[in-house]
Amino acid sequence: MPPGKTVKCVITLIGSTLTSRMVPFRYKFTICKKFTNITLSRVSSRISYRMRSSSVRVFPAFVLSLSSLYRTVLCDVDVDNAVSYETGQAISNWSSTHSSQPKRLYEPLNELEVVRVLKTFSDKKEKIRPVGTALSPNGIGLSDDSNAMISIAALDKVVVDVKNQTVTVGGGTKVSTILNELKKYNLTLENFSSIQEQQIGGWTQVAAHGTGCRLPTVEQMIIQMKIATPSEGIITLSNENNKQLFEFAKVGLGSLGIVTELTLKCIPSLNLHEQTFASTRSNISIGHNRRLSEYRHVRYMWIPYTTTVVGVVSNPIDDKGTSMIKSKLNNNSNSNSKDATNSLVELLHSVQPSYDEKYLKTLSFAQLRDILLDIAPLDLNHVKRVNQVEALFWEKSVGERVDDSTNILGFDCGGEQFVFEVCFPIGKLQENSGKDIEYVQECLKILETAGVPAPSPIEQRWTASSSSPLSPAYSSDKDDVFSWVGIIMYLPPSQTNDQRKQIESHFKKYCELMHPLLVKYNAKIHWAKIELPDKKSDNLNFMRKLIRQNNATNVDSFNRCRKALDPNGVLSNRLIETLFDE
């Protein structure tokens, strides 16, 4: 059989009905009219078969009749590495702003299969990009069309070490799965994003973050990791084992190797007491440094074309405090909160009288905002009115609540969207000069002067520094603090493809207006939210220079790591190559 060719495998199964559990099973495997006895080793959402040292997998899409005694299945197997794959898959990110149609999508069952696939593609000098749940706004995990992709969703183990407060997980495990498993042992992760459906490997590779001046970006939770590389196979890294490479690999953007296993430090589970307040642009700086110092989590939502700034702060609270707050809330229910969406309902009913008002009152704030913006997402006056009623919503929603940290820190980010987020240093907490507030105020002045139809919010968060050289929050000083600011434009559900392109064009211009601020404040762009400009655009040179701004040595070192671990560049895609290649 020529290398790299597909084998059509007809599998005849003999025995009792399959179940979703591991079941000993005998069957015959047909390749090129030869029969070999092998043993069924695992049956799950996928059905895997072990043949000598190789594995062949059959996917549900191949139509398996589980109730009959004799069953025949058709699957595709790469004879170079004996790992099965799917073809004809169309993969898009969460907001449907980026998509890919890989010629093959591999789904290995274990680390050895990952290594075999990587070696095959490295030997042939063909691209293969690791992908997780494809939540990144810029599709950083997607391959360029016609290249292959590899998913490690099957590497989803979760092993909790209660004594040492650590958890060892497969690189394909979802963050939500880890949090749910840790909860059984009264443990949790130190910090996490508002969305928790990312795979842990991809989530840490792009230096995702939550908020809190003393809480770093998420890769700092890693105390040991394994990556599968094209040149070196499986490498185990930690502070004690090749520390320099460990720091680069923690935020490797999927281009140093594929994360197959992580050991993360945990903390005891905690309840958070969250307080939401409404302030103004002129008053938000009053008590700002105190809030950053006293609260574990702080975030602001600035609403364009209004004076409103919404603050959300939270701190851990013990069981006694939890009971007291809940009792107070039960006795003093805020009737305003029940009617908080009235302003949005009234605006929607005024511009679209055909909507049933009773139905509208059943919708959430985010759903109502989506419907309102859907009417005219690029009409400046309309967007201003939507922002104004959103400000009224938040003014009626001030108050407090107590809940598990998982529920407090996760929140509804709205519908499909373009988002551009940057990170910049603000100095040490006790020396904060107000650069974080000044940045957003300048941002608002620029967009409002230009008449950008900017919806709400401009979201601001904070983190501690990271020791990973490619993290936007990198610093050699662990006491440095960074602010993260994100701007947004939504893609409401009924917009046509042409209308979505118009929104995209406006958003690109919106982002370009921010470029002077990025230079002034030494800002770095979030790796999952950096969009490539047109190749001929001056903005492309700007992006490349920005990545190297005060960071050229680390970028050069990162490129040397890429060359050593992936000499043929098979793990990169256009985004990585455009930003990093000389």
Image (cartoon, rainbow, N blue to C red):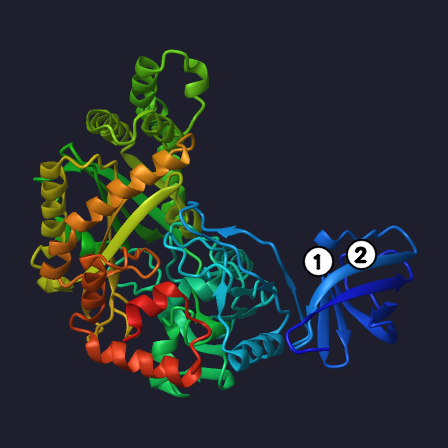
Number of numbered tags placed on the structure image? 2
Percent of width and height locating residue 290 = 15, 53
Horizontal placement of 551 versus 102: left or right?
A: left
The local crowd at label 1, few if under 14, some if 14 to 19, many if 20 or more residues have their Cα within 10 Å, is: some
Determine whether 83 is above or below 137 in the image: below
Residue at figure coordinates x 29%, y 35% from the top left: 399
Looking at the picture, how far across and down is residue 57, in whole percent? 71, 65
- Give the crowd class for mark 2: few <14, some 14-19, many >=20 residues within 10 Å: few
Q: Is disc 1 placed on a helix, strand or loop?
A: loop
Q: Residue at x 19, y 25 (%)?
A: 381
Task: Work out whether residue 148 can be spotted.
Answer: yes
Q: Which of labels 2 and 1 is toward the front? A: 1
Nearer to the camera, 565 or 291: 565
Quadrant where the C terminus is found in the figure: bottom left
Compare marks 2 and 1 and give the one earlier in the sequence.
2
Task: Identify the image quadrant of the N terminus.
Answer: bottom right
In the picture, measured across the screen, residue 126 lies left or right of residue 484, that is right
From the viewer's side, name the closer residue of 285 and 566.
Answer: 566
Front residue of 502/339: it is 502
Asked if residue 576 lies left or right of residue 76, the reply is: left
Q: Quadrant of residue 267?
A: bottom left
Residue 500 picture location, percent across and down: 36, 38
Q: Which mark is residue 59?
A: 1
On screen, residue 241 above or below 168: below
In the rendered structure, find residue 483 and report the number of the disc placed on it: none
Relative to 217, residue 417 above or below: above
Viewer-side residue, 244 vs 10: 10
Q: CA distance from mark 2 to mark 1?
A: 15 Å
The residue that disc 2 covers is 19
**Quadrant of residue 434 in the image?**
bottom left
* Residue 85 drawn at (x, y percent): 64, 64
